[in-house]
């Protein structure tokens, strides 16, 4: 069952908070989103930048930290974070995923993948929705895309 809550209504026992950061830029047909493919490449799973939120940080700081860790960008032109996180129950654990849009500072920025990242791809919204394997990644992208289109 999925529910949406603002962060202040959540405790910290039995829960894991994650950021799902969609780097974006504006192309000729609207926003384009960066998807990552992690090693091993055989899995062919595309995803946004994903990382746990530490106990002492907020959503925006976690997003900046994880983007720097995965692709080497330290600053965003703009950060967009919808006010709601998506909650999924996985056994006794509640996973709370916070979508964040991270507008890159300029279009020709060179990304430097770090760690176990096999591939990067900029995608239009429809292609990104098709490539994303998990429903919560698609829901978070849709929530962000609707906010950018508003």
Image (cartoon, grey):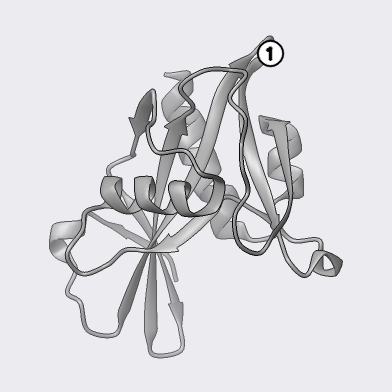
Above or below for 24 versus 46: above
Q: How many marks?
A: 1
In the rendered view, would you say 108 is above or below 145?
above
Coordinates of residue 23 in the picture (x, y in percent): 53, 36
Residue annotated with mark 1: 29
Q: Position of residue 102 (x, y in %)?
A: 44, 34
Q: Is residue 39 left or right of residue 66?
A: right
Residue nearer the viewer, 63 or 85: 63
x 42%, y 19%: residue: 150
Looking at the rendered image, the quarter that the N terminus falls into is bottom left
Q: Is residue 41 left or right of residue 14?
A: right
Tell me what residue is drawn at x 78 percent, y 70 percent.
Answer: 40
Residue found farthest to the top: 28
At label 1, counting other C-alpha atoms closer than 10 Å, the crowd grade (few under 14, some 14-19, many 20 or more) is: few
Residue 16: % across, % down: 35, 74
Q: Nearer the viewer, residue 6 or 51?
A: 51
Residue lying at the far left in this picture: please name it.
8
Q: Where is residue 2? Give x, y as percent.
A: 42, 65
Task: Tell me which residue sits at (34%, 54%) in the image.
Answer: 85
């Amino acid at each position: 069952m999925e529910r949406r809550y603002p962060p202040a209504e959540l405790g910290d026992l039995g829960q894991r908070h994650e950021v799902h950061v969609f780097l974006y830029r504006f192309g000729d047909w609207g926003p384009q989103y960066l998807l990552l493919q992690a090693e091993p490449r055989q899995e062919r799973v595309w995803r946004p930048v994903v990382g746990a939120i530490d106990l002492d940080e907020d959503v925006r700081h976690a997003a900046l930290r994880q983007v720097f860790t995965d692709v080497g960008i330290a600053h965003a032109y703009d950060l967009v974070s919808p006010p709601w996180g998506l909650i999924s129950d996985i056994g006794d654990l509640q996973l709370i995923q916070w979508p964040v849009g991270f507008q890159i500072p300029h279009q020709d920025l060179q990304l430097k993948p770090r760690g176990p990242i096999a591939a990067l791809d900029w995608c239009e919204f429809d292609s990104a929705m098709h490539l994303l394997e998990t429903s919560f990644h698609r829901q978070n992208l849709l929530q962000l895309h609707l906010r950018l289109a508003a």
